[in-house]
Image: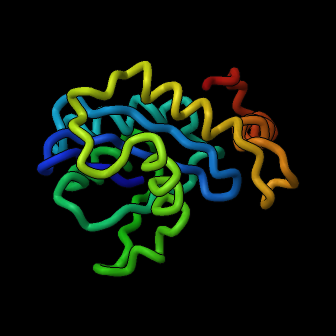
Amino acid sequence: MDLIIGKDGEGAILTLTERSTNFLIMEKLKEGKKAVPLARVVTRLLYPYRGEALKTLTTDNGSEFACHEQIARSLKTTVYFADSYSSWQKGSIENMNKLIRQYIPKKTDFDTVSDSFILEIRKKINRRPREKLGFQCPRDCFFRQVNKKGNTIRHSP
């Protein structure tokens, strides 16, 4: 998981990606980089996948992830941290953030970015075929994988 920060450090978009399928979950954070509200959002977004489908989370050492223990407890998972200045240790989310930046360039004022636009970006990225998936889309691969593990989750965007 990671954050994309808006113009002048204002506003934030939480991004989560599943490593093997590149499935993206993202949401604009109403309260910015604050740790407690961010932990609530992460828990809400990932709660349907807890258990066999959600083994670990990896993030950086930003203060916005200070409530990692709350996230781990709520989701019954483990949160790992990449080493400082080692973004390659969480390469899949860094690459995903680059894809998102095609739609939301740096220095964008996040007050101008609507929740429906965020959802549209998520849909487009999750429906884009990937070579690593045999030219299948992340959404289909992710839900096929989750449903194999015993979780019955309907397709979302």
Whole-percent x and y of residue 3? 32, 50
Going by the image, does 151 lie left or right of 106?
Answer: right
Residue 49 on image: x %, y %? 57, 36
Quadrant of the image occupied by residue 92: bottom right
Given residues 148 and 13, the one toward you in this image is 13
User: Taking 99 as reference, is 151 above or below it?
Assistant: above
Instruction: Tell me how many marks there are.
Output: 0
What residue is rendered at 44% in x and 37% in y?
26
Q: Nearer the viewer, residue 22 or 152?
A: 22
Q: In this picture, is 57 found above or below 27?
A: below
Q: Position of residue 80 (x, y in %)?
A: 40, 66
Tell me which residue sits at (37%, 22%) in the image: 115
Report whether 44 appears left or right of 39: right
Which quadrant of the figure has residue 156? top right
At a point 40% along the width and 74% down the height, the residue shown is 87
Q: Which quarter shows the C terminus? A: top right
Which residue is the extreme one toward the right?
Answer: 134
Residue 124: give x, y in percent of width and height: 62, 34
Please tell me which residue is depicted at 54% across the width and 50% down the height of the picture. Answer: 17
Horizontal arrangement in the rendering, residue 95 relative to residue 4 (left or right): right
Q: How is the image coloured?
A: rainbow
Residue in front for this viewpoint, 53 or 91: 91
